[in-house]
Image (cartoon, rainbow, N blue to C red):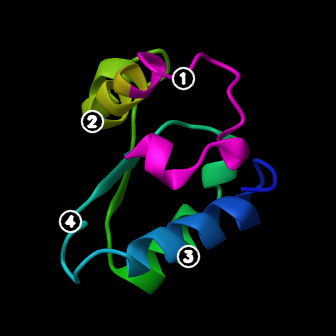
Amino acid sequence: MKDRSAQSMESAIQALHLYFPLGTFQTATTDRGKEFSCHERIRDTLGVPMYFADPYSSWQRGSNENANGLLREFFPKGTDFGKVRRSELA
């Protein structure tokens, strides 16, 4: 994503959605960041209900927090993933 705007987030989610079989995403739980102000368009376009975690309740987004922890084992915080090869991520 080029920035943390709602438009960039919406585009990224739309693009990501194309990589998975239809029906893969049943729901989405996000934090309350301004980049998710597009949640109604995402919900309407993809047909995926959107939920919001309570403030300071990262455990309500367990899959996301688990993935972040796994990435941090190999890539320190602040890593520019635009410069990381896909093979490295795999």
Question: Label 2 crowding class (10 Å Cα cut-off): few <14, some 14-19, many 20+?
Answer: few
Closer to the camera in the image, 3 or 58: 3
- Where residue 26 is drawn, which disc sits there? 4
Query: Mark 2 or mark 3, which is nearer to you?
Result: 2
**Disc number for residue 41:** 3
Q: CA distance from mark 4 to mark 1?
A: 29 Å
Q: Are marks 4 and 1 in contact (CB under 8 Å)?
A: no
Secondary structure of the residue carrying tag 4 is loop
Which residue is pictured at 71% across the width and 56% down the height?
1
Whether tag 1 and tag 2 are in contact, CB under 8 A, the answer is no
Frontmost residue, 14 versus 6: 14
Residue type for callout 1: Phe
**Within 10 angstroms of label 3, few (less than 14), some, or many (20 or more) residues?**
few
* Image mark for residue 75: 1
The residue that mark 2 highlights is: 63
Front label number (2 vs 4): 2
**Between residues 67 and 81, which one lies in front from this camera angle?**
81
- Residue 20 falls inside the magenta stretch: no
Query: What amino acid is at disc 4?
Result: Gln
Kindly state the secondary structure of the residue where label 1 is placed.
Answer: loop
